[in-house]
């Protein structure tokens, strides 16, 4: 299994989520419209933060083979 750090699509999505999480691409000083009493830029940031959390959780659960690390540690202990 290829290490997650060597999969470029993981990093591309992570960088995009990080870049768009800060509202640098919106017009300066824009507050309106308000959505449920929250400025739209804040709502965008909240939604993208939730996507980032979900993406990182998914990566840890599906792309990171933690069991393999535990098996290697057991082999090292048996080999001593």
Image (spheres, rainbow, N blue to C red):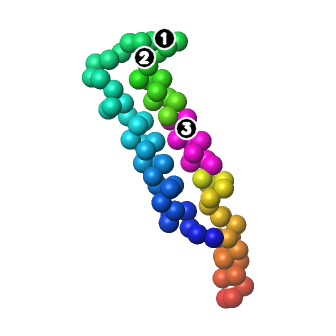
Locate residue 56 relative to residue 41 in the image: left or right.
Answer: right
| Residue designated by label 3 | 51
The residue lying furthest to the left in this view is 28
Locate residue 53 relative to residue 33 in the image: left or right.
Answer: right
Q: Does 75 sit above or below residue 41?
A: below
Q: Is residue 10 magenta?
A: no
Alpha-carbon span between mark 3 and mark 1: 21 Å
* Percent position of residue 35, x then y: 49, 14
Element type at mark 3: helix
| Residue designated by label 1 | 37
| Prevalent SS, magenta region | helix
Span highlighted in magenta in the image = 49-58
Instruction: Of the two numbered discs 3 and 2 on the same chain, state the one appearing first in sequence.
Output: 2
Residue at 46% across, 27% down: 44
Label 2 CA crowd tier, 10 Å (few <14, some 14–19, many 20+): some
Residue at 61% across, 54% down: 60
The residue lying furthest to the bottom in this view is 80
């Amino acid at each position: 299994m290829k290490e997650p750090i060597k999969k470029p699509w993981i990093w591309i999505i992570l960088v995009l989520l990080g870049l768009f999480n800060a509202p640098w691409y919106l017009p300066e000083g824009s507050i309106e419209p308000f959505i449920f009493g929250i400025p739209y830029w804040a709502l965008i940031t909240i939604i993208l933060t939730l996507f980032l959390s979900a993406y990182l959780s998914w990566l840890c659960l599906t792309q990171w083979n933690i069991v393999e690390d535990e098996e290697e540690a057991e082999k090292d202990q048996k080999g001593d």
